[in-house]
Amino acid sequence: MFENLTERLTHTIKRLRGQGRLSDDNIKETLREVRMALLEADVALPVVKEFVEKVRERAVGQEVMQSLTPGQALVKIVNDELVSIMGEACDELQLNVQPPAVVLMAGLQGSGKTTSTAKLARWLRERKKKSVLVTSCDVYRPAAIDQLEKLAGEVEAEFFPSSTEDDPVAIATSALEHARRKHLDVLIVDTAGRLHIDDQMMAEIQRIHAALNPVETLFVVDSMTGQDAANTAQVFNEALPLTGVVLTKTDGDARGGAALSIRSITGKPIKFLGVGEKTAALEPFHPDRVASRILGMGDVLSLVEEAQHKVDKDKAAKLASKLHKGKRFDLGDFHDQLEQMLGMGGLGSLMDKLPGVGQLPQAVRDQVNDREMHRMLAIIRSMTPQERQFPDIIKGSRRKRIAAGSGTQVQDVNRLLKQFMQMQKMMKKMSKGGMKNMMRGLKGRMPQGFPF
């Protein structure tokens, strides 16, 4: 997300490096570029105008510190204004009510409501330790009910059944009674969507809302619709008292116009970002961290939080103990490390949060994908336990068998083994002399041929 905008803004701000100070002329030229970058990102025109004007006012004022270069000064101003238009802080779900707290999901068909319902259930269960019940009021699409039931099982949330013959309001009220009887913490209600906004759909959602009186009414919208997402959210907000927005499919949106437009147009905060298809791919929306990503400064805080929640601490402790005792890092350990990285959203998600990635050439960023990691995992899984533990025994005939078993070429197996040997040397340095020796061994670079 924001790849195009990050590239344009980074390039624009770089031009100021040779300037002695911020002047009317260089501010005017730079803001023209910023304006074009935002419009190309499909940010709504009124939002662009307001943003550029605020940056201009601050840039020509007395806010430039003498210790800052013009580029640094403008980055600070742009960062502050990005945070301002997206919301000053992360708006958390307001669940401090008498249980069950009801969360109503609204949106157009295809926006990702059902998947987002399951993602939110998982997030509440894992991060907030809540017991969650989900139900579907989409009586027009039997597949939606079946999909939610399947996803509920996957995220370990309780599912309240419904059918196409039931009344949506009756489903919602029955689910609420069930949640009360079972003393569950949260009820999430998935509502029906349409391909476009119509009076019948709005009237139905309004009836469900009146019957449930939810503490949170979240509008689920596809980020790739750009500023149309903000306009649709505004129409829904006029019919329903929305409390926030869930922006989906952000991993496929290189522009980010919706994220920058919604708060200004609707006045409602973005509460979550859907960052992938898996049920774990949901992130709370932190305006300050997103602004940092847009300006190519990364998002280390979110990266640390992801690691805390998704890295298998037992496996990490076992590996650390193993290396400390002088035992060799083997292909089984390498396999676990690759799996952990995929569990954190894969290379794309990790790279998005690392500082300076926006300044890498596009050709380099395009090479960062998870296909190579999946290929490497397939190769390791085609090995015997003995081969994983003692890679030195993997010679010609074994390499052919492993390649055939993993659907790859012998050259791929050779490349993996070479990469593994370099990784093994790196781990040996770390076990002997800690991180300092490892970094000296790397000399500022990852091992040659490593997949990222």
Image: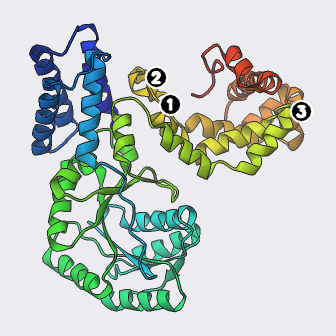
**Mark 3 residue element:** loop
Question: Residue 192's spot in the image, x, y percent?
Answer: 30, 75
Please count the marks in the image.
Answer: 3
Question: Which residue is located at x 41 percent, y 63 percent?
Answer: 116
Label 2 neighbourhood size at 10 Å, few (<14), some (14-19), many (20+)?
few
CA gap between label 1 and label 2 equals 7 Å
Would you identify the image quadrant in which residue 145 lies?
bottom left
Question: Residue 78's spot in the image, x, y percent?
Answer: 25, 31
Amino acid beneath label 2: Val
**Mark 2 residue element:** helix
| 278 relative to 360, above or below | below
Comparing labels 3 and 2, the label whose residue is closer to the camera? 3
Would you identify the image quadrant in which residue 40 lies?
top left
Please give left or right for residue 311 compared with residue 128 in the image. right
Marked residue nearer the N-terminal end (1 or 3): 3
Question: Residue 174's spot in the image, x, y percent?
Answer: 41, 92
Please give left or right for residue 323 compared with residue 275 in the image. right
Question: Residue 153's spot in the image, x, y percent?
Answer: 57, 72
CA gap between label 1 and label 3 equals 31 Å
Q: Residue under label 2, please give it.
A: 364
Question: Which residue is located at x 20 percent, y 61 percent?
Answer: 233
CA gap between label 3 and label 2 equals 35 Å
